[in-house]
Image (cartoon, helix red, strand yellow):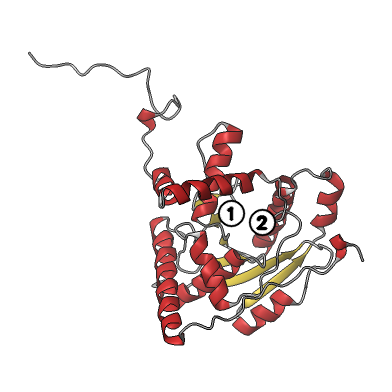
Amino acid sequence: MSSTEASIPIRLHKPSSRDPRKAKYNTDKLVKRLRRQVGQAVMDYGMIEDGDRIMVCLSGGKDSYAMLDLLMNLKRSAPVDFSLIAVNLDQKQPGFPEHVLPAYLEQLGIEWHVIEKDTYSVVKRVVPEGKTTCGLCSRMRRGTLYEFARENGMSKIALGHHLNDIVETFFLNLFHGASLKAMPPKLRSDDGQHIVIRPLAYCLEADLERLAEIRNYPIIPCNLCGSQANLERQNIKRMLADWERVQPGRTMSIFRALGNVAPSQLCDTALFDFTGLARTSSET
């Protein structure tokens, strides 16, 4: 069996040997903070409504596990009634541990589905060796998930992108697309048939990593896209990490700026009527 066909390892965290009382205190504090951030994002952007059937896209990575965990926590105390349906897309990567997610989801006692579609072979056949696979892979994955959501009456599609993802996307678009845009916490699909929500929009990746360690999620690494060393997103991530070391809090400041836009101070004539500007007449 070749290295690419070897089984994908499951990453489990070793339990900490720290004082259990202090560990519990820190865990409770972390969960409360993340729960509060998810609740605030849901409220600020009107992500969840009464009667929603929310398709929670579960990849096997730390972020999607945390999203499902926190949404289940939110559901227990939410003022509206909604359903959570966990959905995983099995892209038929060689060695993918098919048993892991079903076993985990069975323990949670919620509705779940696994969609089987061999997008892996298509991506490997179409994308030249050494080139980034993310673009084609994400489009195929998105199309498959949208189709499933439409056929199964899902009113919302929840994705596990967090605050750092949003900031990184902003710089990717800035540097490589010459545009000021990021990942909105809530959006309508191009065809108008789906509402996509990102409940982790206010959550920092470091906190989600800590939660994954505490909860001991059975992480399934992605050897198709996430491990590509030449991804531009990884370069952006390193840049932001360097900035954060020099000036802690810079990433959060950039994220806040995305919600504090002044069109009159930019250069987009479609957003602000520069040609119509005139002096305010003064009374003599």
Q: Position of residue 123 (x, y in %)?
A: 81, 50
Judge from the rendering whether residue 133 lies leftward or rightward of residue 180; answer left or right: right
Front-lying residue, 238 or 162 = 238
Image coordinates of residue 220 in percent, x first then y, are 70, 68
Asked which secondary structure carries label 1, the reply is loop
Lateral position of residue 180 relative to residue 230, left or right = left
Crowd rating for badge 1 (residues with CA inside 10 Å; few <14, some 14–19, many 20+): some
| Residue 190 shown left or right of residue 41 in the figure | right
Question: Which residue corresponds to mark 1?
Answer: 194
Packing grade of label 2 (10 A; few <14, some 14-19, many >=20) is: many
Tell me which residue sits at (78%, 68%) in the image: 8
Residue at the left extreme? 284
Q: Earlier in the sequence, mark 2 or mark 1?
A: 2
Front residue (pair 284, 136):
136
Q: Position of residue 28 (x, y in %)?
A: 42, 78
- At a point 54% along the width and 49% down the height, the residue shown is 188
Please state which amino acid type lies under the numbered disc 1. Answer: His
Task: Please name the amino acid that badge 2 sits on.
Answer: Tyr
Q: Disc 2 versus disc 1: distance between alpha carbons?
A: 7 Å
**Residue at the outermost top position:** 284
Image coords of residue 83 (percent x, y): 54, 72
User: Any mark on residue 146, and which?
Assistant: 2
| Total residue callouts | 2
